[in-house]
Every structure is written in C-alpha cells, then in structure tokens.
Image: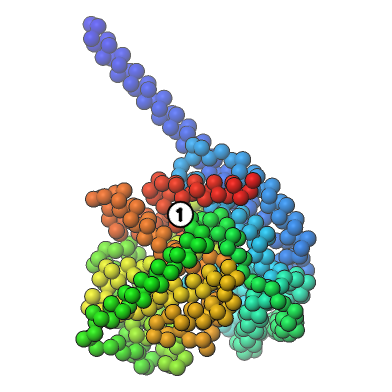
Amino acid sequence: MNIKSFARDLAVKVFALISLIATIAGNTAAVAQNKNHSELVDFFQDWRAFEKPQFKKNAPDYSPKSISGMHSELKERMQRLAAIDTTNWSIADKVDYHIILAEMNGLDFNIRVLRPWQRDPAFYTSVFIYQSDTPAHEGPTNHAVIELWTYEFPLSVENENKLSLALQTIPPLLEQAQSNLTGNARELWIGGIQNLRRQAENLIELQGQTEETSNAFKKSLSNALLATQSFVTWLEKESPTKTGSSGVGKENYTWHLRNVHLVPLSWEEEVSLLTRELDRAHASLRLEEARNRDLPPLKAIASPEEFEQRSEQSIKSFMQFLTDREMIPVHDFTEPALRAHTGRFVPEAERHFFQIAIHYEPTTLFTHWYHWWDLAAMQAAPHASPIRREALLYNIWDSRAEGMATGFEEMTMHAGLYDDNPRVREIVWIMLAQRAARGLGSLYAHANEFTMKEARDFHVKWTPRGWMRADLDLLGFEQLLYMRQPGYGSSYITGKYLIERLLKDRSAQLSEQFVLKEFFKEVNEAGVIPVSLIRWQLTGRNDEILKLTNDHLRSHK
C-alpha cells in the first residue's frame, strides 16, 4: 500500500470514528434531554396535584390555615423548580419549564394579592350551565365546579349518582365561604351576589328537569338550592359593611401581566396600546362608512327561519374562503365546530352587543370562533407534551386564546372575506372598538381610577352606534369578570397585538419561504399558551422571556 492510499484510508476511518463519536454524543444528549423533560413532567404532575386544596367536610378547604400552609409549601416547590438547570435543553422543553413557573406565580399572586376566596363571592359559584369557549372558565373558579352542560336529561342512573354527589359539595362550601370572606372589596362583593342569584335560578330550573329522579337526588338538589339562597341573603346582609376598593393597583397589575400571563407589557403600556386601538377603530369605521356611502345599509335578520338560512349561507361561504385562500389549516373538525355554535334567533329588543352583530352578518362572529377550533384541536390531537395538553391554570392562555380569536376577525377582513359585501367591514371595526373600550375601562378600574360604574359608562360611551347599552346584563358580566381576573379585559387587544407582531417577526425571519397557512399551523401546534412563549419557540428569539425572567428575579430579591 502506498503512502497516499494509506493516508486516504486512515482519513476515512478517522472521519467515520468522529462521526460515530458525534452520533453517540448526540444520542446521549438526546437521551439526557428526554430524561430531563420526563422529570419535568413528573414535577408538573406533582405540582398540579398540589395546586388542588385538600377537601374538608366534603368541600375544598380555602380557610386561612389551609392557604397559609399552601403558600409555605409553594415557596419550597418554587425553589426546587429554580434549582433545575435548563442550560442544554431544547427551546420546547424550556417553554414547558416557563409554563410551570408561570402557573406557580399565578398561585403566588392569588395568595398574596387577588385572594378570591377572601375577597370575591363569585369564586364560590359552583354551577355552570354553558361550556366556555376558552380552554377553561374565565376568571377564578373553585375546585368543585359542576359542569351542568355535560349532563344529558333525563339523567341516567350513573349520572344521577354522579351529579348528586357533586351537588353535595355546595352546602359545606358556602358555609365555609361565610368564614373565609373577610375581604373589603365592595364592587367584587356586590357583583358576586348576582352570580350566586343566577346559581339559585339554575338550580330551580334543574329541579324542573329532574322531577323523575330519586328522593336522594332531590334532597341533594334541594339542599344545594337552600344553601345558595341562604348564602345570597347573607351576602346582601353583609354588603353595607364593604367599603374598600376592588382593583389590584397598577404595580400588582403589571407584576401579574409579566410573571403570570407572560405578557411583556406594563399597565401603562397596555393603556397606550388600547387607546391607540380605540382611536384606530373609530377612525377606520368613519372611513369605511365614507367608502360605503353609496351602498345600501345592512339589514338585520328578522325571523328564526332567516337566521337559519343566513347562518348556513355564512358557514358555506366562510369555509370556501378559508379553503380557497389557504389561510389556515382546515381540519375535519373545522366546519362541525362552526355548525355547533351558530347561536339562535333573538328578537331585536332583546339582543346584546354580539347578537346585534351576528344578526347583521353571522360571519362576523364565526371568525371569532377560532376558540372552538382550539378546543376541538385539543381533543382531536393532544399536544405531545403533557404540560400543554390541558388548560393552563389562572387563565394564562388568555393572550393566545382571546388574542387569536379577536385578531382573526380583522385578519380575515384584510384577507378579503368581505370584499363582496363591504358594509360588513364596518361591523369588524365596531367590534374592535368595543373590545378596546371595555379593556380600557377594566384597566382604569384595576388602577382604582374608575369605579365599576365608570368603567361600564366608558364601555358604553365608546362602543359605536349604541350597540352596548347600560341595561344589558352582558355589560355588568364583562366588567365584573375583568375585575375578578386582572389582565383578561385587555387580553383581546394585547393578545391580538402580540400575535400580529409574531406574524411580522416570523415572516421577516423566513422571508420568501414564509407561508401564511404554515404560520397558523406552527402557532396552533405550539398549544394554547402565552404568545411570548410561542414566539420563542417559533423564532428562537428569547428577548421577551429573558426580560420577563429578569423582572421576576428582581421582584423576588
């Protein structure tokens, strides 16, 4: 063998050896990384079990002693999480880590600041008759909720027993509430009374649906109703003694945004953003009206038959648009999810804001039903990571869920959805103005610069065409919800902005390779998690998360 051949063979063997070593090292790193993530999943499952309070007398225990003990143990668990070294983890695994950290911060905030079990009577509402269009119920809820909408009537024997046991948690929970509710948040107190009155009404309606059930079930139901009515009476009696403010204040609001919801904004920045969107919506509406001045006005649906016919027409045209424009991935569940939530005809005098919109053009609200696609996707294709398969706690999903649903209304408009009926574009701007107005009202209410009435008045004043009225139950429901859950009222607009910014960043990064449909596919597959985390996973840019993490560390020094 000559020298050249020997050298060539040696080089080949050396290269093969190096490749083998690299492969082994890579496989070893992958195994180690999977082991790390597996341990994180174990930590997560243990955390979720811990987050549920112990039951006492057949109800979750929110007593001061229980909450104090939970807070002490939470701090120890947070130290254990902080000790985990994520240096060599994949971005996706690091995202999962930050989800757990955000949830833990959520419980910490609830214990230190929000204290719903102490300040918020609505926290003790147990009965929910409708499915939420978001991954979990909006606002703080107790750990013994009864999803009445999941039952079919007449009840089977199995479901009768199941529901009977669930109803038995209501009396001890409301008895406990009278000891726990020592807070002085007047507007939360007054607003919560209505929620419990509604629970009593729902239980009375349930009695009418279950006349053929056993005596044991009827007793459980009767006791739950009597406990609810007694609790309402107690709340009304105590209400004159409640004189304090209900907002969490600007500093706490900002901490909650950045550390729980992972929204890289402050209270002041959210006010600026929502003010800009309110201005833009009103100005755009006027320009739209000028452009459409020679077109006939929209006519509202006038009968149940017309509502059914127009809904069907809107579903077909909307689905055709999504398919032809290749804007988003269209799945087997996409159209059925729309059909399951078309709504119903409502007489003109009884319509609230969104019913007014849908009676002029059903598609305007169907574009917001990205919510139902999210929920269908969570069922049809559970996320690979157990940490992202179910709803995140403390409404941490709001920037993604509400931001996407709100943003998609305007995105589809700009993509040409209403080119054949330009008057409908006016409704899109009206809906954006309403979201901005109600969000601003909630921001000022949390800063304790607005009373709830002033927040509602602002909401009414800046919603165009008088579509939001002071006498509508929807008005009080929305502003109370946003007082109960800091950051939620603004999330429709701030989440929309964060998704638009992500679209900009991702398209700039991919340049000519950017495909809109693929963008939505990537976002959807990341899960219903904070947009800042989706941005990190899609673009590799962690500047927002680093800033939020540093803020968190500084706030705990």
Q: What is the quadrant of the N terminus in the image?
A: top left
Local secondary structure at mark 1 = helix
Q: Is residue 264 visible?
A: yes
547 in relation to 162, above or below: above
Give coordinates of residue 286: x percent, y percent. Answer: 31, 79
Which residue is drawn at the image coordinates 28% and 81% (left, top)?
289
Q: Nearer the viewer, residue 172 or 549?
A: 549
| Residue 154 image-quadrant placement | bottom right
Q: Residues within 10 Å of mark 1 (few under 14, many from 20)?
A: many
Looking at the rendered structure, the kind of residue marked 1 is Ser
Which residue is drawn at the image coordinates 27% and 68% (left, top)?
415
317 in relation to 269, above or below: below
Colouring used for the render: rainbow
Q: Nearer the viewer, residue 496 or 84?
A: 496
77 in relation to 7, above or below: below
Q: Count the numbered circles shown.
A: 1
Give coordinates of residue 26: x percent, y percent. Answer: 43, 32
The residue where tag 1 is placed is 532
Give coordinates of residue 202: x percent, y percent. Answer: 61, 84
Q: Is residue 180 left or right of residue 14?
A: right
| Residue 129 image-quadrant placement | bottom right
Which residue is drawn at the image coordinates 63% and 48% (left, top)?
556
Q: Nearer the viewer, residue 440 or 327?
A: 440
Which residue is drawn at the image coordinates 75% and 56% (left, top)?
69
